[in-house]
Image (spheres, grey):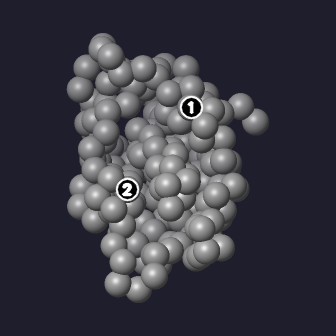
Amino acid sequence: MGKTRTGILVCSLLLIGAVVAWAQGRKPGLWEITSTVTLQQSPLPPGMQMPASSPLAAGPHTAQVCLTQAMIDKYGAPLPQSSSTECTFSNISKTDHGMTADLICSGRMTGKGTVESSWSDPEHAKGTTHFTGTVTTRNGTAPIEWTRDSTSVFKSADCGDVKPLLPPEK
């Protein structure tokens, strides 16, 4: 289950990053993102819960991301490092107050999702990601479906010790 958790974590980082999206006036720097996942279909057998360390565990998860101007200009969101190349954005559509994109994952977690983000000012955003697919477990593959609702708040122009995540190249 460790590799499955790693795959889920990697894709979750991609999805967490998607809530800090592009628009004129978006601020590069340190953002704090709080998200909550709802599992519509768990890959675990009935009666089992996600481990507390899993990004798909119940309850809110908070992460800090460093958003660069280049990420704002090119992708509209920070993307995870090369270990997360299993997931990519496509069909990115940006407006002055939001963005949408398709999420496509292949590898340990395979499937498709939709990403939506909106904001009313340069320092606050809300986002939703919905994903449906399968995940590889030690017993084969299992269906998975989840929704992640997130809020993000700009903290500082200085990212401090938080390094920007490098986007995967296609």
Residue 21, image quadrant: top left
Q: What's the residue type where badge 2 is placed?
A: Ser
Name the residue: 43% across, 26% down: 67
Residue 102, image quadrant: bottom right
Image: 62 above or below 29: below
Kindly report the distance in space between the C-alpha atoms of the residues bearing marks 1 and 2: 19 Å
User: Residue 44: x, y in percent?
Assistant: 46, 76
* Disc 2 target residue: 54
Q: What's the residue type where badge 1 is placed?
A: Gln
128 displayed left or right of 88: left
State whether residue 76 appears in this view.
no
Disc on the earlier residue, 1 or 2? 2
Image: 50 above or below 76: below
Q: Residue furthest right?
A: 170
Disc ID at residue 81: 1
Image: 75 above or below 134: above
Disc ID at residue 97: none
User: Residue 101: x, y in percent?
Assistant: 58, 51
User: Residue 166: x, y in percent?
Assistant: 56, 26
Tag 1 secondary structure: loop
Name the residue: 25% across, 20% down: 156
State whether residue 53 appears in this view.
yes
